[in-house]
Amino acid sequence: MDIKEEGETNFEQQEKPEGGLKMRIFFIIFGIGSLLAWNAILSDIGFFMNYQAKYKPSTSFAFFNFALNIVFQFIMIFKKQLLTYKTQLIFGLIASIISLVALPFAVAPFEKNSLTSFIITGGIILFQGLVNAFCCSGFFGLTSFFPMEMIISLSSGQGISGILMNVIGFIVLASINTGDGDQDAKIGAIIFFSISGLIILLCLIVLLFAFKSDYFKYYLGKTGEYNKMQNKIENNVDEGAIVSRATGEKEGDDGLVDDEKENSEISFLELFKKLYDVDLLSCYIYVITFALFPGCSINQRLFKTGKYRQTSIVTIYNVFDTIGRSIISKIKPTKILTYIVVLGRTILLFTLIFNFYLDMNDYISPELSSIFVIINVSILALTNGMGTSLCFGLAPSLVPDKIKGRAGGSISFFNIFGIFLGTCVAFLTNYIMGEIGEYKED
């Protein structure tokens, strides 16, 4: 029976559709949604530190989130994909909305430093780690099948996510003033996390619209994303056989296309052998970043910004990180460029700490020290964004088409693994800063 008579589309024969501005905006929104949950928690971490200071949420929350995130992302790239990207992302986004909206209600009804409140909050953060794994791995894997411009758009959206949460946080704080600081914090947190949930809901709606577009059908048509469940349930036929009939490729004795069978059974070790240098570079990016940011960076002088000092430094970082992710669209990604960008930023481990040493010992003026902080943080952020986009863009080009999604998932996993290692190194950098001396406002 002709495949077209069965209602299937031969994507191979379709005219290649143009993504255009609409699709680039869609992928920017996907990037925002992929990291928004964790950025929301970081942006309002002061709320949790105020009510759960005894349990050090600034460090414990990161451990809870990234510990499970690493585990589940590893499982997802180690095992053959069990769910379609659409199903995986729908679950991840809906679960993100629920967990974000629930967070302030795990704190507000309880007294400060309540163990019960911390246990409930910690449980939500643990669950959020699983959810973040679904979202990050899903979006990275999905986008790996698309052209480079869409990969850059997604990466840019991830940078914008942090800026967006900072802006919303400032607006919420400025809008609420009942005269009761604790009450303001509780109301602000409920509003802030509710807005965060609405933004993720927008991302979910955009995702559903995108899957109906010809653009998505063209690039995901041969992945089984559209016909996997339908073929298994309605026709009870093997997905590989349908692909072979649609493309005319040779089937093996078991009905699978030879190339597809090989790719579907590729192990994690075999995938790592294909991507080891890009994977390790993507990991190293975040080892350096989280060794220096936020702890080592926000503890330094920034002119006379007073209580806005830390937020200002975070904003500088987010802006330049977004710029770094975006400018790669004007540059051809190569391994040589990636090595230079990623390894070259190692020097920042010394320059940021050395600047703090000079400032604390009055070897340079406060104004000059502040300028050096801006330069160092800007370079740290710019190279973080550039390196992330370069690795994310290179990985899918190094593997066969059928496993581009797993290549994207591999980069996502090593990013998170690098964050975990970076937070460990941060204990050392923070210790060194402590030995030098803590900056006090004038």
Image: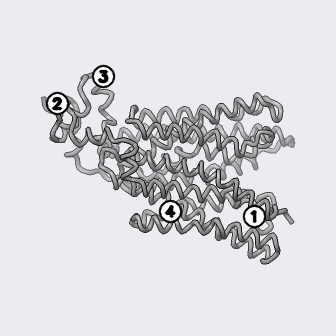
| Residue 296 location (% of width, % of height) | 70, 60
Q: Which residue is mark 2?
A: 5
For image coordinates 63% across by 40% down, the residue present is 195
Q: Residues within 10 Å of mark 3 (few under 14, many from 20)?
A: few
Amino acid type, mark 4 = Met
Q: Give the spatial CA distance, label 4 vs label 2.
A: 47 Å
**Vertical side of 24 occupied by 141: above or below:** above
Q: How is the image coloured?
A: one colour
Residue at the disc numbered 4: 386
Gap between marks 1 and 3, in whole Å? 60 Å
> In screen coordinates, is 418 left or right of 301?
left
| Helix, strand or loop status at disc 3 | helix
What amino acid type should be assigned to the residue bearing mark 1? Answer: Gln
Q: Quadrant of residue 344?
A: bottom right
Q: How many marks?
A: 4
Amino acid at the residue labelled 2: Glu
Judged by depth in the image, the label closer to the viewer, 4 or 2, is 4
